[in-house]
Image (cartoon, helix red, strand yellow):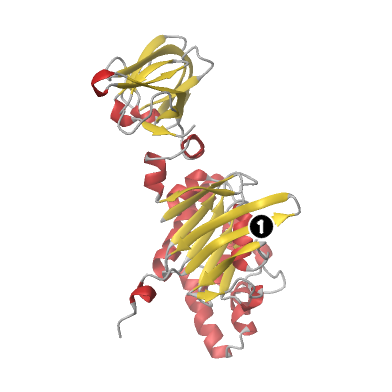
Amino acid sequence: MLAKPEQATQPKLLVDGLAKSYGATVALKPTHVAVKSGEFLTLLGPSGSGKTTLLQMISGLVLPTEGRLFIDGSNETNTPVHKRDIGLVFQHYALFPHLTVAENIGFPLKMRGKSTAEIDKQVNGALDMVQLGHLAGRFPRELSGGQQQRVALARCFVYQPSIILMDEPLGALDKKLREHMQFEIKRLHRQTGATIIYVTHDQEEALALSDRICLMNHAMVEQIGPPQEIYARPRTAFAADFIGISNIFRGRVELGSGGAAHLSTASGRYRIDGASLSNNAELALVVRPEHLELGSTGANEISGRVAEVVYAGSETRLLVDISAEQLVTVRVLPGKPLPSLGENITLSWAPEAAVLVTP
């Protein structure tokens, strides 16, 4: 039977104007987000941006001041947390120390009245999924941090909740283990098709995991879209600066004859695409480090002194002092000649390699 048109496009989760205030303090301004079934959406932003408040309202741990929340088309705004079909994974694993790995994973099934045979079957499947079958009889204190987090993930996935919420689940792990667990979470998402909403302040984590990123700042959504779109086409200077490394030049638009347009900044005057721009409009020009070339090869040029040379393994980064109270970052790939520390150099870029954003 074919779904009705409105059912076919119905989001798994709809945040319809949710907002939260504590007296005069606004924790989250009215927010609208739709999440598709099977999507991996990351709420990304600095501390105090509202991402955890939004996650807590989705879970039911916090009730909104205004707005509505729909899951599969049903209004769940005031549904108690224990009655929402939602799984939670936190930074601190919250494993029961007196229960084995298998017993921890099976706990939510036991609470739901599943039979022993059904629990054993689903726990074994979850253990295989996180590749911990050989540790089923161990206690949490006998596991590494990464193993404990995999147990927490298995405990959440085992009862197949409608939506899985993850709040900084990898925050307590070291960098190498965190990167490994990113692959684990990505694999589990692909394997199960679960709808996941993930909170982090780590931009690299968000870029690696997400189908879409909901970038938050000052208690509101700054930009939402696929990682590639937000990185390549940020809408604001904050988005450009928070996700990846950016060189940002703020200035005013100067429209000339014959369609010529420039952005006049403290460090220079740069050619831009003037279509749909207003004269004297205040904008910012974003140039990523990988789009800057050494030498006079592009239409826009800037000169400065090499203030620092930073080796980063797969690349070397140059910090160039352009004498406008600003350092410009340039990425140089292996095999290319490097200027010396203190050397005066010229950098250039093509107008189409830069993005104009609101300052």
Residue 188 placement: quadrant: bottom left
Residue 309: x, y in percent?
Answer: 46, 20
148 relative to 324 in the view: left or right: right
* Residue at numbered disc 1: 20
Q: Which of 340 and 225 is in front in this view?
A: 225
Residue lying farthest right? 23
Residue drawn at point x = 39 percent, y = 24 percent? 279
Asked if residue 307 can be seen in this view, the reply is yes
Asked if residue 130 can be seen in this view, the reply is no
Q: Nearer the viewer, residue 87 or 17?
A: 17
339 relative to 164 in the view: left or right: left
Q: How crowded is mark 1: few (under 14 residues within 10 Å), some or many (20 or more)?
A: many
Residue 49: x, y in percent?
Answer: 61, 47
Residue drawn at point x = 74 percent, y = 50 percent? 24
**Would you place residue 47 above or below residue 22 in this image?**
above
317 relative to 153 in the view: left or right: left
| Quadrant placement of the N terminus | bottom left
Residue 274 placement: quadrant: top left
Q: Nearer the viewer, residue 200 or 314?
A: 200
Circle 1 SS class: strand
- Residue type pointed to by label 1: Lys
Residue 80 placement: quadrant: bottom right
Residue 31: x, y in percent?
Answer: 55, 56
Residue drawn at point x = 57 percent, y = 70 percent? 87
Residue drawn at point x = 47 percent, y = 37 percent? 236
Residue 43: x, y in percent?
Answer: 53, 53
